[in-house]
Image (tube, rainbow, N blue to C red):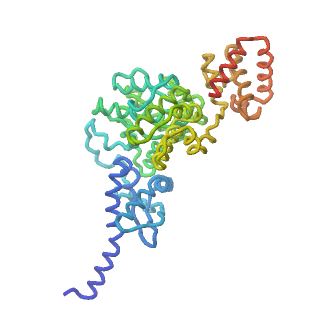
Amino acid sequence: MVSPQRRQKRTVVDKNEMPNDTWGKARDELRQTVGKNNFVTWIEPLKLSSLANGVARFEVPTTFFGDWVSRNYSDHIRHQLANHGSPVDRLEFAVTRNAATRPNGTSLEPAETRPAAPARAASNNDDLPGAPLDARFTFDSFVVGKPNELAHAAARRVAEGGPVTFNPLFLYGGVGLGKTHLMHAIAHELQARRPELRVLYLSAEQFMYRFVQALRDRQIMDFKGLFRSVDVLMVDDVQFIAGKDSTQDEFFHTFNALVDQNKQIVISADRAPGEIKDLEERIKSRLQCGLVVDLHPTDYELRLGILQQKAEFYRQQYRDLKLADGVLEFLAHRITTNVRVLEGALTRLFAFASLVGREITLELTQDCLADILRASDRKVTVEEIQRKVAEHYNVRLSDLIGPKRLRSIARPRQIAMYLAKQLTPRSLPEIGRRFGGRDHTTIMHGVRKIEELMATDSQLADDLQMLKRLLQG
């Protein structure tokens, strides 16, 4: 017979173990729902310290780590805890104070003093701390048009996995123009064609986090060995390392090590290397040594092609729905911001029409998407004007913005200044800042010069009319 004292002790132990039992079950489910790489990077290091009064408290290695998990995985964690009988209202994160061990219990002993890990098979990518690939982002689902055909062709060449012909491949452009789609497509294709290659795709923010974590854990040699052992390194949104001196330094050395080994590098950013503020000059120079490709804003034909592909997919899901003529053309003309907004609008439209059981007519479209249509009224930006003018006159965008005074560059620059004054609400000082920090009087002079020339130069007048049409959709 169990004594009262022993029974009481056993009850206390069970009570203490219960939260971690729940968390263990929740972790098993999270491993399946967030993917292995995400699980290892963001979920596995979490240590549940308490689960009571509707609050789950976790120990995390850094404040940045806790903030990231809170933003990206809190809903997943709360859902799984609720599924296993412990619903919580909120999650709280506290930085681990024990400097002797990592959150997962492994030693912080410097890498140089530990036995070397056994070599891994070249085809094993499971140990790479990358971001998960989106199954939707393949070459088959990428709609090619004039604004993105060069970027698509370059990405296809890299995805063949053959000898490196240009390194790095640098893709840049605004939000929702397909940079991330192409990078995921390259990774998918390489995994299919060359499964033995170690392909690592991650965001610049994740690269920075892994580097900071390695510094904190005194695992910098492991970090260097891991990132320099890949065959293809793909870093998305590289502009986020600008201004981070230590991270830039490590990125530069990793870049050089891979190039020296003839390993392929693919980089994306929201602007050209030379235009990324606070990015070290040596990194800009390195990035410009390869093929730099601009994904231009979508034109009408490309937007219509994207809508037609998406609509065909939805027709298979909503077989009873009818789509009236002219709806897709209307959307392609009105929603010009980016592809994500365009696809999101069509998704909402089909879902709404299915719920109310009505045909998708122009009237229904205008009612259903009134807020998106209002927000998407054509707003021309100074940056878009600069890109269009540089493309039209076949000059480099960096030269158009830069200090060169050659006539072949100065005249297109004045045209861009004139269009910026005519088509945007920006003040002259604001326009000047976007043209390399020029004074507002310089902008005023450029505007007046073009106004004078328009009266006598018919070719210039024609160019301006065409550029206005292109910019205003």
Q: Is residue 153 above or below residue 362?
A: above
Can you say which quadrant of the picture contains the C terminus? Answer: top right
State left or right for residue 222 relative to residue 68. left
Residue at x-position 33% and y-position 31%: 190
Q: Could you tell me residue 465's position as x and y percent?
A: 69, 19
> Viewed as shown, does residue 469 lie left or right of 95?
right
> Quadrant of residue 132 in the image?
top left
The quadrant of the rendering that contains the N terminus is: bottom left
Q: Position of residue 463 (x, y in %)?
A: 68, 16
The foreground one among 142 and 251 is 142
Q: Position of residue 103 (x, y in %)?
A: 39, 58
Residue 439 in sight in this render: yes
Residue lying at the far left in this picture: please name it: 1
Q: 368 left or right of 106?
A: right
Residue at 43 percent of width and 72 percent of height: 52
**How many tags in the picture?**
0
Figure check: 204 above or below 161 = below
Seen in the picture, residue 410 relative to 366 is either above or below; the reply is above
Give the camera-side residue of 421 and 290: 421
- The answer to whether residue 290 of the structure is visible from this angle is no
